[in-house]
Image (cartoon, grey):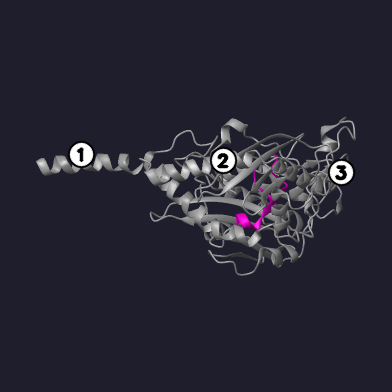
Amino acid sequence: MKKNKLLIIFSLMVPLITFVPSKTNLRETLILEQKIKKISKNDRIRKLFLEEIYNLTKSFNYEIEYITFVKDFSNNIFAVATYSPGGYAILHVKTGNFIEVSTNAIFEYEKSEIENKYYVPLYGFFNESGKKIKYENTISAQDSYSRLNHLKEISNKLNTNYTKYTNFENLEKLKGSKEFIYKEKFNVVEKTSEIEICKDAPKAKYEVPYSWYFRLNDKEFPKNNGNGGGNCGYVSMAMMLLYADMFWSAGYLSVYDYENFITKANGNYGSVVPTFSNDFIDYHWPNSSSLVPLDAGDLVDEFMNGKSIDYDCKTTIWVFSKSIDDLIKDGMPVSYYGSLYDKDGKKINHAVTVYGSYDDGRLLAHYGGVNMHQVIMSKAGMFELGGYMYIENYEPHVHRRYILNNEKAYCGCGFLMSC
């Protein structure tokens, strides 16, 4: 009995011991805090953020609301800036590489919420225990421990990726050895309309046909519950299916889907987009949660079962085969899934829909949330143990009414249909 009691007591102590920071960790934390304090005094970071948004928009009307600093679980330091009237950027300080940039999104975090917190590209912001900022109200100690180890694994994987995308010109500007091209000007244009000032992301070198379908969709599509990645894979999957039905061949969505879950766009063709209702995912996948590419491919095939559509849903499993750039050039949007399994078979996942490719190693993506439809993401934030899903269509196009304009109705392809 005494042995059993001792075992029970010891087993209760282990989780407590696990979370006690070591002297080494404390020393590393202090060093990191000192680095952040030193970096925060470098005004050239502020100028670099202003130059980045100017290079993308050619507008002097952006101002910085705040700059703060976050880290990842491998002691990389990131500067986060929010712009007024809209937009944000996240800079990997050591390589001068902008991991994420939006020219129009309203950043959802206050400075105090993320200051000195942890950032993992695509996944978002976390506290020291692996709990996601804003979204997760409850998380068990066991899940938190698993999540923390998983996030550390992701950070370690990305750590080797960052240096591949070093921006030496930005580093020279941060060190003061190279001048900024951008020169601050004030009151150049009177701010009469925030909508006019808050620009769209610049056109990528390659964008899929009808890319305005993604560019214009600034609403939840359908609702993304946001729980640590949540059903974002299903959101991306839904976007891909509606895209296929609008522009490739009607029949990817059933008549029931079309009549019950689609809100037809109302306005000029090419300037408005139809959307799913929030019930689409709940109806088809009521237990939606985290996905990896293979899961997504299986679900698409299951969804398409019995439909006479000649297509192929392809997935990569942890190794990039055909590059995303090549798929975008071929006119196919791609659901990129950043996901890793942990030792217990659990996974953290986030999925974005990529629909454009730039020359400089960056991609144009829809992040699946409100007002997150035009995010420029660096490949440095994608790891080769992720993967993607895409659909190849072999059917001729079939018209369906998706856009209404007074007494006229248009198919997604632009074909004018009679009501």
Q: Say left or right for 106 vs 184.
A: left
Query: Could you tell which of marks 3 and 2 lies nearer the N-terminus?
Result: 2
Q: Residue at position x 48%, y 33% from top?
A: 137
Could you say which quadrant of the image residue 279 lies in?
top right
Q: Is residue 366 magenta?
A: yes
* CA distance separating discs 2 and 1: 38 Å
Q: Secondary structure at mark 3?
A: loop
| Disc 2: which residue | 226
Range of the magenta residues?
364-382
**For the residue marked with disc 2, what is the amino acid?**
Gly
Q: Residue under circle 3?
A: 268
Q: Please name whichever residue, 109 or 167, is drawn nearer the observer in this view of the structure.
A: 167
- Please rate how many residues cluster around mark 1, counting C-alpha atoms within 10 Å: few if below 14, some from 14 to 19, many from 20: few
Q: Is residue 297 left or right of residue 347?
A: right
Residue 9 bears which disc, if any? 1
Picture layout, residue 71 above or below residue 84: below
Secondary structure at badge 2 equals loop
Residue sitting farthest toward the front: 177
